[in-house]
Image (cartoon, helix red, strand yellow):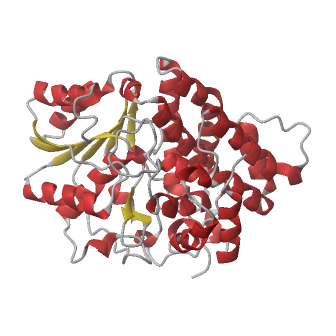
Amino acid sequence: MGNETAFEMATSNLRFGFGVTREVGMDLADMRMRRVLVVTDSNLRSLPPVERTLTSLEDQGIGYTLFDRVRVEPTGESFRDAIDFAARGEFEAFVAVGGGSTIDTAKAANLYSTYPPSEFLDYVNPPIGKGLPIPGPLKPLIAIPTTAGTGSETTGVAIFDYTEMHAKTGIASRRLKPTIGLLDPENTRTMPPQVAAASGLDVLSHAIESYTAIPHTCRPRPERPLFRPAYQGSIPISDIGALEALRLVAQYLVRAVEDPSDDEARARMILAASYAGVGFGNAGVHLPHGMSYPVSGMVRDYKPAQYRVDHPLVPHGFSVILNAPAVFRFTAPANLERHLRAAQSLGADVSRVHLEDAGKLLADTITGFMQRLKVPNGLRGLGYTAADIPALVEGTLPQHRVTKLSPRPADPEELAALFEDAMVAW
């Protein structure tokens, strides 16, 4: 078949502005929807974003049922809980109010209740699942993010912890994309600073990973357009979103974390999340995310201070960014120019830097953000030791969907060295 010669640009419709949450009822009325499932988590249920959403539905006479059992960092079991709930109702559409965990849960509930598979893993990415194509269009899904990080409102990806393997995996299809994402900066005011930090660092890594991923022309050309993967490798349009996201992160992330009342910073960060989402939702991510999945899945007792959870949890943005400096030092030789440009977009002074030092400069720039935002100092800060490295490597190896997009392949020995390097950040 030869190598790929085409790329696709797929994203949700997006609407940005203070107060756009109040338009969700009108959107559903215009779609002639009469009964919807509103998906959220127990912490958000009593907070303004959900209140505004439900009021908008009521004002337009839209019937709704509220599902508030989303798990922060969802598992296969929590996905099934939402799927079963959705399957018992006669819902015409879905509304997700929350962060990536909520939006991803709503995507899974929409898919599995619309096209029930023979087995849960049928739609899940190989090699863990079968990766079967979604057979047709899904019901409308309106995503209302309350964090500025995952970009899930733009993508056709739903991620969960597959507890049987102590690692994350997911489902990827353009048909999973929300119908529209309502980017309302008012909704991010409820984020505690630590949540804003983790979310923003996820944006940072999304952008660099998609920008430094292998070019889409390095992949084999698919037999049919339907089989073209959601994660294609870097493409010209995704590059634009990635670099703009990095510029916004450089200017506004610290402000958004250190001053929750800074409306300008919060607004720019929710835009940055969507810019990066458009980028990685088409180009993909690579090693920092692939390595992050076992870091999240193998957590023993770490609980972040400002997350209201009753179970051990590594915030996704932390699990990703702790690997990032080690990874970008490693991948830089594959494309020094792109790594240098990423560092420059993050605010680094490149005027006196030798090109061969691009990886070190990018890693040092990321580490500076980690220190300023008080991230744990490496994987040891989460409770991991050198004894965990073999299991972390084993949890990374099945993540083919993302690891194969790395500009520099990493075998098990190289992954072990990367995890060792990530144990202490500074």
Q: Could you say where residue 170 lies in the image, as x and y percent from the top left? A: 40, 63
Q: Residue at x 26, y 72 (%)?
A: 120
Q: With 423 as the anchor, is 42 left or right in this view? A: left
Residue nearest the viewer, comparing 168 with 305: 305
Vertical side of 280 occupied by 407: above or below: below
Q: Residue at x 64, y 41 (%)?
A: 243
- Can residue 71 be spotted in the picture? yes
- Can residue 178 be spotted in the picture? no
Q: With 232 as the anchor, is 300 left or right in this view? A: left
Q: Residue at x 80, y 45 (%)?
A: 361
Q: With 271 as the anchor, is 111 left or right in this view? A: left
Q: Could you say where residue 281 lies in the image, as x and y percent from the top left? A: 48, 53
Q: Could you say where residue 251 lies in the image, as x and y percent from the top left? A: 64, 27
Residue nearest the viewer, comparing 280 with 87: 87
Residue nearest the viewer, comparing 102 with 280: 102
Vertical side of 2 occupied by 7: above or below: above
Vertical side of 258 occupied by 362: above or below: below
As drawn, which residue projects farthest toward the bottom? 1
Quadrant assignment for the N terminus: bottom right
Q: Could you say where residue 279 lies in the image, as x and y percent from the top left? A: 54, 49
Q: With 185 as the anchor, is 178 left or right in this view? A: left
Vertical side of 314 occupied by 396: above or below: below
Which of the 4 image quadrants contains residue 6? bottom right
